[in-house]
Amino acid sequence: MAKTTNKKTVKSKNLTKKTTVKKIAKPKKVKTKIKAKDLIKKYQAHKNDTGSTEVQVVNLSEKIEYLAKHLKKHGKDYDSKRGLLMMVGKRRRLLNYLKQKEIEKYQKLIEELGLRK
């Protein structure tokens, strides 16, 4: 954590007094630990593949799972709730695309992730 300091001069009764005000930097966002690295490796077309539809769905599913746990604890965190809803919508759109283009991959993916019945 980086800390910055600003010095302020306060005058009172002919005395000069220097005070130090510490500003605490915002904590860095912690990336969610992805438990599904083996699933990602399974669906990657090549070693550095992060953009294929299947890999995106797996990544979004992990993030959604993390945010759902967070919102159970912090119910009034509306920014996270909005982010969760946006991620669910994006995952739904990706799954619909996959269903239209490659139905076999779609069925295999939802079965392994346990998304739909």
Image: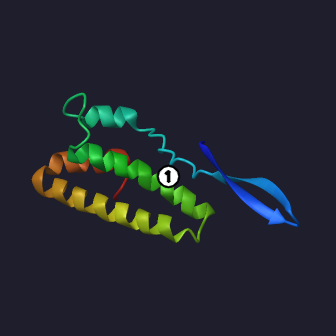
Q: Which residue is mark 1?
A: 66
Q: Amino acid at mark 1?
A: Tyr
| Quadrant of the drawing holding the N terminus | top right
Q: Is residue 73 left or right of residue 16?
A: left
Residue 75 rendering spot, x and y as whole percentages: 59, 69
Categorize mark 1 by other alpha carbons within 10 Å: few (<14), some (14-19), many (20+). some
Quadrant of res 90:
bottom left
Q: Is residue 35 left or right of residue 39?
A: right
| Quadrant of the drawing holding the C terminus | bottom left
User: Which residue sits at x=35%, y=46%?
Assistant: 59
User: Which residue sits at x=22%, y=50%?
Assistant: 106
Residue 6 rendering spot, x and y as whole percentages: 65, 53
Residue at the outermost top position: 47
User: Which residue sits at x=23%, y=50%?
Assistant: 107
The kind of secondary structure element at disc 1 is: helix
Residue 80 rendering spot, x and y as whole percentages: 49, 64
Q: Give the colour scheme shown.
A: rainbow
Q: Is residue 23 left or right of residue 44?
A: right
Residue at the outermost left position: 101
Residue at the outermost right position: 13
Camera-side residue of 15 and 6: 15
Quadrant of res 70:
bottom right
User: Which residue sits at x=25%, y=37%?
Assistant: 43
Residue 112 rendering spot, x and y as whole percentages: 34, 44
Compared to residue 42, the image places residue 7 above or below, namely below
Camera-side residue of 110 and 82: 82
